[in-house]
Image: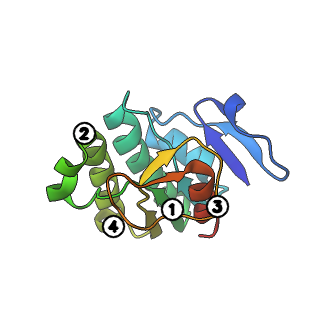
Amino acid sequence: MTAAARHPENIIKLDGVTSDKLDLHADVEDITKQVKVFDAIYFTAGSRGKDLIQTDAMGAIKTMMAAEKAGVKRYIMLSSMLSLDVDSWKKIPGLEDYLAAKFFADTYLMNSTNLEYTILQPTNLTEEAGTGKIKLDAGPTNSNPIPDVAKTLAKF
């Protein structure tokens, strides 16, 4: 398994996992060269609001395009609750632009690719210890620890 990030030095060291640098601002051809050895792509990148268009939206879309060109069949997207429910975005003030970026990436995956996909839309992610459980209610005050969401993603 390969974990790729813009800062691979920050990837947690795990047995059986190698780290690699992946630039989501690169062109699709360069990304295609990197992903051609993958069986699946898990897209979990996020700009934390600093680069929503180029990372959260286009970064995801470029990895989808690269996956198809490289023959990668499976794509797992970490999205956000309510990303596809535009009328509900107002329930989460301050996240409208983030949800718009996720909307475009999710919609592209569903409607413009032939990839086998899973989209996980968790509630707010928190940087706290995992509980071994996730909350499925999309209430605006619900949250899930990142380790629990990561374990859920791994099941896909």
Q: Residues within 10 Å of mark 2 (few under 14, many from 20)?
A: some
**Residue 33 percent location from the top left of the image:** 59, 45
- CA gap between label 2 and label 4 equals 20 Å
| Residue sitting at x 29%, y 67% | 111
Tell me the residue that label 1 is attached to. Answer: 76
- CA gap between label 3 and label 2 equals 27 Å
Tell me the residue that label 4 is attached to. Answer: 110
What's the amino acid at mark 3? Lys
What's the amino acid at mark 2? Asp
What's the amino acid at mark 4? Met
**Residue 55 percent location from the top left of the image:** 41, 37
Determine contact: label 1, label 3, CB under 8 Å.
no
Mark 4 secondary-structure assignment: helix
Q: Is residue 106 left or right of residue 90?
A: right
Q: Residues within 10 Å of mark 4 (few under 14, many from 20)?
A: some
Which is more foreground, mark 1 or mark 2? 2
- Mark 3 and mark 4 lie on one chain; the one further toward the N terminus is 4
What's the amino acid at mark 1? Ile
- Mark 2 and mark 4 lie on one chain; the one further toward the N terminus is 2
Indicate which disc residue 151 carries.
3
**Residue 83 percent location from the top left of the image:** 29, 56
- CA gap between label 3 and label 4 equals 23 Å
* Picture quarter with the C terminus: bottom right
- CA gap between label 1 and label 4 equals 11 Å
Q: Residues within 10 Å of mark 1 (few under 14, many from 20)?
A: many
| Residue sitting at x 35%, y 57% | 81
Tell me the residue that label 2 is attached to. Answer: 97
Viewer-proximal residue, 43 or 152?
Answer: 152
Viewer-proximal residue, 123 or 108?
Answer: 123
